Image (cartoon, rainbow, N blue to C red):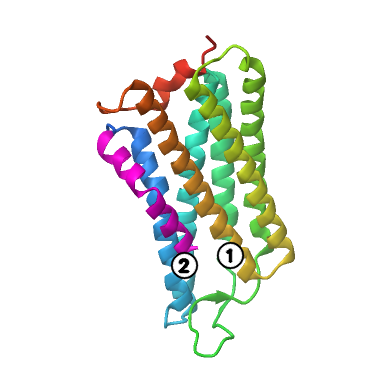
Amino acid sequence: MATFWIYDYACSFHQEWTFLFRSRWSKVKGLYLVARYVPFLLLAGHLYMNFIPNENSDKCQLLNNICSCFSLISVFCSECFFVLRTYTLWNNNKIVLATMITTFFAVVVSSISYAFATTATAPWTTSGIPGITGCYQSSSVVQLFIPFLLLIGLEFGLLSLTLIRAIQSWRSSNSRIYAVLMKHNIFYYACGLFFSGVNVLTLLLFHYGYQAMFQDFQFVILAILATRMHLHLWHTDRHAHGSSAFVCIPMSDISSAGSPT
């Protein structure tokens, strides 16, 4: 997983640094930086857990809590991108925004509660492979499927809002950025629904090792999709306005793209 993340970073290195140096600072840029680099901390934490020489259960639990925090931050930032984009597609409709924020924070609070409550009592053990140290859970935590069910509900609702907006305005909007926003939203939500469904199945049916692998995979993939799509949107807008000037595309400035023309 770490190799996959590093490979993606290497492939987008030029585009990313062009964005970082040529775009103006904004809240969305700060969100991008957190979403982009928190998975690095998450993967580093899990690698350390897998090879830590001291198998003390308290230390393992502490490291697991830290990694869980990184996971939640990563998913939170990735989803924030698309909550803002959905808000933009709905022409900054305050009722839509209030509904999304209320649902979003309800899912976040519930997920945090379930995640930390269920892993706090999970037993830790050494690896069954001779010579391999690290933190491993001897049994799976089935209840962890609940946060993924909540995430499925959130992304299904956001996907529904995007599709409704697409049906309403598919004939009246000719903006290229609007089309990019729509395609990105639908693809991101479809991937989120798919990986959340996979995680629910693995939590219910498979061993802890498979569960942890698919959970990290989803968090990293969602972060990559969110940041890659933001890069693509920024470069699309940059080419549309000329590449010689600094470009800033906060979500509030894209609202005109979502307006039928």
Instruction: Tell me the tag on residue 168.
Output: none
Report if the CB atoms under discs 2 and 1 are less than 8 Å apart.
yes
Kindly identify the amino acid type of the residue bearing the numbered disc 2. Answer: His
Return the residue at label 1: 212
Which range of residues does the magenta coloring cover? 1-22
> Can residue 232 be seen by looking at this rendering?
yes
SS class of the residue under badge 1?
Answer: helix
User: Could you tell me which residue is drawn at 41 percent across and 29 percent down?
Assistant: 236
Left/right placement of residue 235 relative to residue 106 reads left
Residue drawn at point x = 34 percent, y = 34 percent: 27
Name the residue: 60% across, 54% down.
114
Taking the view exactly as shown, the residue that stands out farthest to the bottom is 130
**Front residue of 236 and 142:** 236
* Tag 2 residue: 46
- Res. 249 visible in picture: no
Above or below, 123 against 155 in this view is: below
